[in-house]
Amino acid sequence: MPFYQMVCIAAHNAEYVHIKELVRLSATQIMNQGGVVRGIKYWGLKTLPQRMRQNRVYHSYGDYWSMHFDASPSNQRDLSKLLRKDPRVIRATVLKMGEKIEDVVVPREKTIRNPMGVPEVREVALTHTRPLAPPPGRSNSGQ
């Protein structure tokens, strides 16, 4: 199953009950059709980059949240349709991150250990790409 990330902007309300219900609805939509929700993250209340209109109402603020999930393409389309019809959603987009989660996650570098079990120390040469600035009160031009 492909790995997706959904970013959603929900209409702001002083009570966060509607966001909890929207997240619950989205997650159960994915899981009921055999998908796996990997993570949900609330980004907070933010000012929208421009005034947006949804369902004949103009919005200046929105609650941003994202969800990472594995699902079939038809399951992802059903979720997009569901969010498009929901009056609490200002904007939602689903991005395909990869065919599977292993395509997205960078594998950790294996450390090389010597026979004694102590990690090897490697020397690293530091180089500067630009000259250091002179101390305050001094100039480079003459002495």
Image (tube, rainbow, N blue to C red):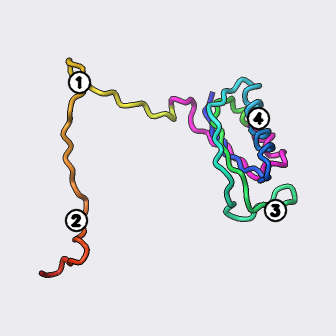
Q: CA distance from mark 4 to mark 1?
A: 48 Å
Q: Is residue 52 above or below residue 141?
A: above
Q: Nearer the viewer, residue 17 or 67?
A: 17
Q: Which is nearer the N-term, disc 4 or disc 1? A: 4
Q: Which residue in the structure is indicated by mark 1? A: 118
Query: Which residue is at a point 75% across and 62% down the rendered structure image?
Result: 60
Q: Is residue 139 left or right of residue 73?
A: left
The label shown at residue 44 is: none
**Kind of residue sitting beneath label 3:** Tyr
Residue 81 among those drawn in magenta: yes
Is-magenta flag for residue 137? no
Residue under label 4, please give it. 24
Query: Which residue lies under the disc numbered 3?
Result: 58
Q: Position of residue 113 (x, y in %)?
A: 25, 23
- The stretch of residues the image draws in magenta is 77-102
CA gap, disc 1 and disc 2: 37 Å
Q: Which residue is mark 2?
A: 131
Circle nearer the N terminus (3, 4): 4
Cα distance between the residues tagged 4 and 2: 55 Å
CA neighbours of label 1 inside 10 A, class few (<14), some (14 to 19), many (20+):
few
As shown in the figure, which amino acid type bears the numbered disc 4? Arg
Which residue is outermost to the right?
56
Q: What percent of the width, then of the height, locates residue 72?
A: 69, 29
First of labels 4, 2 by sequence position = 4
Residue visible at 69% across and 26% down in the picture:
35
Residue 117: image location, x then y, percent = 24, 20
Q: What residue is rendered at 35% in x and 31% in y? A: 109
Q: Quadrant of residue 76?
A: top right
Q: Sequence-wise, which precedes: disc 3 or disc 1? A: 3
Among all residues in the image, which is located at the extreme left? Answer: 143
Which amino acid type is marked by label 2? Pro
* Residue at image location 76% in from the left, 30% down from the top: 28
